[in-house]
Amino acid sequence: MTALLVDGLAYAYPDGHQALFGVDLRVEEGERVAVLGPNGAGKTTLVLHLNGVLTAGAGRIEVAGLPVAKANLKEIRRRVGVVFQDPDDQLFMPTVRDDVAFGPANFGLRGADLDARVKQALDAVGMADHADRSPMHLSGGQRRRVALATVLACDPEILVLDEPSANLEPVARRELAEVLLDLDRTMLMVTHDLPYALQVCPRSVLIDGGVIVADGPTRDLLADTALLAAHRLELPFGFRLD
């Protein structure tokens, strides 16, 4: 089943800046796809269309066959879970448990069903032992995993991650990657971290100038030094693909 279909998506901001010029993207159920590109390429604009924060100027988007349209926004936002780069955008309750319960409670889950969903989400990210702690007292990596749990608790079909490895120390990067690789979810990961894209996502798309300029196996895209250079991307010094 096709989890995500983007067909001819174009968008201009109110100030007239054209951010997307006709993006076509198909993601099948269970795929993990990295979205690569330099700053200003259109990555964030694309992501904000996937759960209806922005409305397409042209083209269409479907999530598991359901059009992303005003009448479907509540269901679309349940199906597409976005994990923001900054956990402070998602963690605001007194305890970890409260934060993780907030989303599914808003979708109508109550009582034992809600408790089970919260436990399942915290187990999935390895944070069940911290359920009664304040998110403010956690490390950066722990907060990133709790933010992921707040989205998983809503049981989305597509998980969208915005720069998940940003500002994490090496151990926290590895722990988060292990969590992501264990999740049985369709995943779209926006990242500048090319080694992380290779670690987590077998497929990548490269966006620049508001269009997709490359789509293929992550290893193949990262091995194409001319392609990376043309779009202001590069692997860390000394990093080897073999």
Image (spheres, helix red, strand yellow):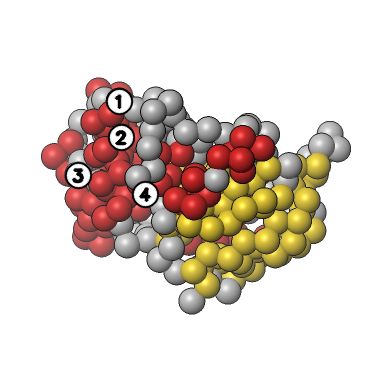
Q: Position of residue 117 (x, y in %)?
A: 27, 57
Q: Secondary structure at mark 1?
A: loop
Mark 1 residue crowding within 10 angstroms, few (<14) / some (14–19) / many (20+): few
Q: Residue 169 shows which numbered tag?
A: 1
* Distance (Cα) linking label 2 and label 3: 14 Å
Mark 4 residue crowding within 10 angstroms, few (<14) / some (14–19) / many (20+): some
Q: Position of residue 111 (x, y in %)?
A: 25, 58
* Distance (Cα) linking label 1 and label 4: 17 Å
Which circle's residue, 3 or 1, is located before the other in the chain? Answer: 3
Asked whether the beta carbons under mark 4 and mark 3 sit within 8 Å of each other, the answer is no
Q: Residue 3 shows which numbered tag?
A: none
Tag nearer the camera, 3 or 1: 1
> Left or right: where does residue 144 sit relative to residue 48?
left
Say if 177 sits above or below 111 in the image: above
* Distance (Cα) linking label 4 and label 2: 11 Å
Residue drawn at x 62%, y 61% is: 25
Residue at the spot of label 3: 126
> Would residue 172 be visible to someone looking at this image?
yes
Say if 51 sits above or below 71 in the image: above
Q: Position of residue 237 (x, y in %)?
A: 43, 26
Residue drawn at x 66%, y 37% is: 230
Residue at the spot of label 4: 200
What count of labels does the image hold? 4
> Left or right: where does residue 80 sit relative to residue 213?
left
> Left or right: where does residue 116 sit relative to residue 91?
left
Asked whether the beta carbons under mark 1 and mark 2 sit within 8 Å of each other, the answer is yes
Q: In the rendered structure, which amino acid carries the disc numbered 1?
A: Glu
Q: Position of residue 124 (x, y in %)?
A: 23, 51
In which quadrant of the rendered view does residue 57 lie?
Answer: bottom right
Q: In the rendered structure, which amino acid carries the disc numbered 4?
A: Val
Which circle's residue, 2 or 3, is located before the other in the chain? Answer: 3
> Left or right: where does residue 76 sit relative to residue 239?
right
